[in-house]
């Protein structure tokens, strides 16, 4: 009789545990999310690290990315496309039908954090977007880019500049807008 009562109590405890959600799986999921960093939600058809893009006869191998995340979605995604002489960058804004084909610009980097305008060869570019962001790196990107930062985008017609800053890191890029319809995915 005592054995039957002990067995019944064990079955009752087992059933109660099955019916109540366990905190252990939730903690494991939370720990996994902290190890991998914040997850970036993406649109269907968004560009990804490892893809090769073709524009005007030039190939861009997307080796790494810096996603500048605001409100859970990338406001701007910067892809590094390594080249022998210097890295090229492609930037995909959250909205619009253009990409930005960019290269590092030492003169822009030397300005420090820009105000509402930056000089350009043909005149002045005005700031069209700026703000605080979370920088989420993936793939092959320069060291030290992760966490809270800020960015600004400047435009004048088809000329564009992007400045990203995080701690002591500053990335100052200048280039041209590229219509997305003119960019092809390879393979």
Image (tube, rainbow, N blue to C red):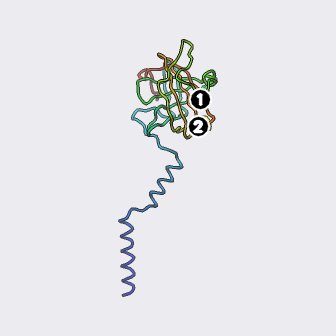
Residue in the image at 52% along x and 28% along y? 152
Residue identified by numbered label 1:
171
Quadrant in the rendering for residue 169: top right
Q: Residue at x 49, y 26 (%)?
A: 53
* Secondary structure found at label 2: loop
Q: Position of residue 17 (x, y in %)?
A: 39, 68
Q: Position of residue 171 (x, y in %)?
A: 59, 29
Disc 2 and disc 1: Cα gap in Å?
Answer: 10 Å
Q: Quadrant of residue 93?
A: top left
Q: Are circles 2 and 1 on residues that touch, CB within 8 Å?
A: yes
Label 2 vs 1, first from the N-terminus: 2
Instruction: Say which mark, if any, is on residue 33.
Output: none
Judge whether 107 appears above or below 76 on screen. Answer: above
Identify which residue, 57 or 72, lies in the foreground: 72
Q: How many marks?
A: 2
Question: In the rendered image, which quarter contains the N terminus?
Answer: bottom left
Whole-percent x, y for residue 12 in the image: 36, 74
Which of 46 and 33 lies nearest the eye of the viewer? Answer: 33
Disc 2: CA contacts within 10 A as few (<14), some (14-19) or many (>=20)? many
Farthest-out residue, top: 122
| Residue 154, percent from left and from top | 51, 22
Name the image quarter holding residue 19. Answer: bottom left
> Of the numbered discs in the image, which one, if any, rests on residue 145?
2
Determine whether 125 is above or below 22 in the image.
above
């Amino acid at each position: 009789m005592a054995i039957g009562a002990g067995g019944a109590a064990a079955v009752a405890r087992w059933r109660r545990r099955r019916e109540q959600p366990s905190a252990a799986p939730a903690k494991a999921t939370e720990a996994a999310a902290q190890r991998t960093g914040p997850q970036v939600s993406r649109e269907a058809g968004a560009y990804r690290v490892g893809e090769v893009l073709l524009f005007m006869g030039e190939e861009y191998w997307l080796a790494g990315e810096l996603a500048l995340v605001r409100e859970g979605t990338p406001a701007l995604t910067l892809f590094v496309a390594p080249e022998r002489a210097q890295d090229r960058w492609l930037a995909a804004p959250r909205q619009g039908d253009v990409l930005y084909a960019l290269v590092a610009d030492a003169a822009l980097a030397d300005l420090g954090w820009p105000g509402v305008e930056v000089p350009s060869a043909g005149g002045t570019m005005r700031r069209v977007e700026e703000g605080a962001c979370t920088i989420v790196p993936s793939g092959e990107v320069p060291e030290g880019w992760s966490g809270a930062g800020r960015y600004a985008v400047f435009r004048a017609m088809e000329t564009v500049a992007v400045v990203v800053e995080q701690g002591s890191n500053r990335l100052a890029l200048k280039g041209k807008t590229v219509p997305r319809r003119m960019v092809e995915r390879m393979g």
